[in-house]
Amino acid sequence: MPMNRMLAATLVLGLGTLGAASVEAQTTFSFGLWGDMPYAKANDAPKLPALVADMNASDIEFSMYDGDIKDGSSNCTDDVYTDAIKLFNSLKSPTVYIPGDNEWTDCHRTNNGGYDNLERLAHIRKTMFNTPNSFGQKTMELEHQGKPGEKFAENVRFMRHGVMFVGLNVPGSNNNKVLDDKDCTSKSARTPAQCAADNAEYAERDAANIAWMHDAFQKAKADKAPGIMIVFQADLGFDIPETEEVDESRTPGRNGYAAFLDNIISETKNFPGQVVIVHGDTHYFKVDKPLATATAMIGNLTRIETFGSPNVHWIKVSVDPTSRDVFTFHPMIVPGN
């Protein structure tokens, strides 16, 4: 399908007419979307101060970071996570972090240090999701699927002025699903036992993600929310093969995102408002309707892909819960970056 790389100053999504809804707690507001930075191999670090300053000078109420706090060919050392915490806490407004593949799924690779990637996931949960709150100089309390520091603590959701927001641990590299023995050991020191553990982790987390998302849709409908935004890291295979040798997105039985995507489609078709899915992973800013054919388009489902290294920019989202459009997207190109 075509890759729509739209860089218009303002992009507006249409929304079909909603039924009568309570808007007493609803008001206009804005927030930010960003991710996939900084990458050492692209020398992104000098660009971060300008990015942070630009976001801090805006009127956003919060931001959501959709994964990849480092590049995919550097070691998964503990300082990577502490540096990310410092970055997120340099934002004046609350910052919600969603994990990406570079900081856990891919850490087993030899060029990432040959870590046990499930140990790195446990480390993220213990160090970055050990409280109910977001990051940022000003924090906000989030609802977590798991207890602080424990399994699925990284899956979050919250309501803001009548709109539902969901963060899910759906990372690149096929959602941590191991396809076969070759996939297990390619560029990796993983053992068969570790790959079996990865597949067990994938199956359990995939089911948990779907359940958390379903509950969020149910709550959004019960609260008559005009919109819901679901943020995760992985490009689910909308545009190009994600791996070097296997296009798992189009091979039956090999796609680690199939059940999750099927559930997004099902939930969206049964939701009367606007559904926006946000991801990073492939680093091209996009706004589109990401289905296989035009005749299969779901009118109220829209995909946003955030900027990523070496493009150190962000997206400002304006929200008017009482309007037909609900979400308006503004690509924020940071001067000098």
Image (cartoon, rainbow, N blue to C red):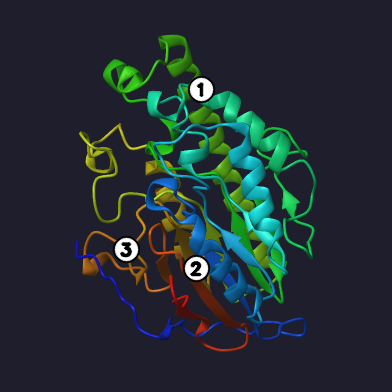
Inspect the image, locate mark 3, and give the three-letter code of the amino acid beneath it.
Pro
Q: Is residue 101 above or below residue 311?
A: above
Judging depth in this view, the residue of 38 and 275 nearest the camera is 38
How dense is the environment of label 1, judged by Cα within 10 Å: few (below 14), some, or many (20 and up)? many
Which residue appears at 46% of the width and 40% of the height? 101
Judging depth in this view, the residue of 111 and 125 nearest the camera is 111
Secondary structure beneath disc 1? loop
Secondary structure beneath disc 3? loop
Left or right for 116, reference 280: right
In terms of sequence position, does the residue under pointer 3 or pointer 2 come before the other? 2
Can residue 155 be seen here? The reply is no
Left or right for 50, reference 28: left
In terms of sequence position, does the residue under pointer 1 or pointer 3 come before the other? 1
Secondary structure beneath disc 2? strand
Can residue 240 be seen here? The reply is yes
Q: What residue is shown with label 3?
A: 290
Kindly report the distance in space between the C-alpha atoms of the residues bearing marks 1 and 3.
34 Å
Q: Quadrant of the N terminus?
A: bottom left
* Tag nearer the camera, 1 or 3: 1
Q: What residue is shown with label 1?
A: 115
Which residue appears at 64% of the width and 80% of the height? 57
Residue 308 in the image: x percent, y percent? 41, 59
Q: Is residue 139 above or below residue 113?
A: below
* Tag nearer the camera, 2 or 1: 1
In terms of sequence position, does the residue under pointer 2 or pointer 1 come before the other? 1
Inspect the image, locate mark 1, and give the three-letter code of the amino acid beneath it.
Tyr
How dense is the environment of label 3, judged by Cα within 10 Å: few (below 14), some, or many (20 and up)? many
How dense is the environment of label 2, judged by Cα within 10 Å: few (below 14), some, or many (20 and up)? many
In the rendered structure, are the residues bearing label 1 and label 3 in contact, judged by CB atoms less than 8 Å apart? Answer: no
Q: Quadrant of the C terminus?
A: bottom left
Q: What residue is shown with label 2?
A: 275
Residue 86 in the image: x percent, y percent? 68, 52
